[in-house]
């Protein structure tokens, strides 16, 4: 399942909600959109938006038997 929005895993509560949904729907792969902090020009990515949220998602998902892949895309 593609997880496009950062808010879907940005807090412990949202991560738990997401992973419970995956469990109920037998989803074992999350394709997570990478979100960046941008440079002052507003366009150049300089760092992950919240590395801890990504790490916590990956760790929690792994414990639940769910693989996480980081992807980048643009509408």
Image: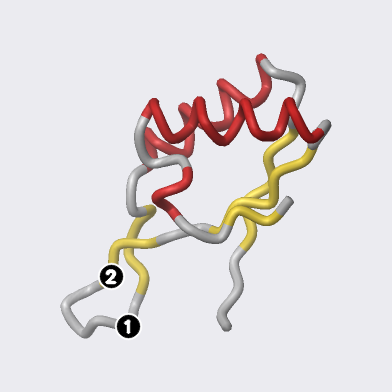
Residues under numbered marks 2 and 1 in contact, where contact means CB atoms less than 8 Å apart: yes
Kindly give the residue lying farthest to the front in the view shown.
Answer: 24
What residue is shown at x 57% (from left), y 83% (from top)? Answer: 75
Q: Is residue 73 left or right of residue 22?
A: left
The x, y position of residue 28, in whole percent, is 80, 34
Which quadrant holds residue 21? top right
Which labelled disc corresponds to residue 38? 2
In space, the residues marked 2 and 1 are separated at their CA atoms by: 6 Å
Where is residue 47? Give x, y as percent.
34, 57
Label 2 environment density (alpha carbons within 10 Å; few <14, some 14–19, many ≥20) = some
Q: Secondary structure at mark 2?
A: strand
**66 or 40, nearer to the observer:** 66
What colour scheme governs how the chains and residues are painted in the rendered image of this protein? secondary structure
On the image, the x and y values in percent for residue 72 come to 59, 66
Of 73 and 11, nearer the camera is 11
Q: Say left or right for 33 vs 31.
A: left
Q: Residue at 24%, 81% (x, y): give it.
A: 42
The one nearer the camera, 34 or 8, is 8
**Residue wearing tag 1:** 43
User: In the displayed structure, does residue 74 sit left or right of residue 11?
Assistant: right
Instruction: Identify which residue is drawn at 78% across, 40% down.
Output: 29
Q: In terms of image quadrants, where is residue 30?
A: top right
Rendering coords of residue 45 (x, y %): 36, 70
Secondary structure state at the residue bearing disc 1: loop
Total labels: the figure holds 2
Closer to the chain start, of discs 2 and 1, is 2
Mark 1 surroundings within 10 Å by alpha-carbon count, few (fewer than 14), some (14 through 19), many (20 or more): few
Extreme residue toward the left, this view? 40
């Amino acid at each position: 399942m593609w997880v496009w929005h950062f808010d879907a895993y940005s807090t412990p509560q949202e991560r738990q909600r997401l992973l419970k949904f995956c469990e109920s729907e037998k989803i074992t792969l999350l394709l997570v959109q990478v979100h960046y902090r941008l440079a002052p020009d507003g366009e150049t990515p300089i760092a992950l938006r919240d590395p801890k949220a990504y790490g916590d998602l990956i760790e929690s998902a792994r414990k639940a038997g769910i693989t996480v892949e980081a992807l980048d895309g643009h509408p």
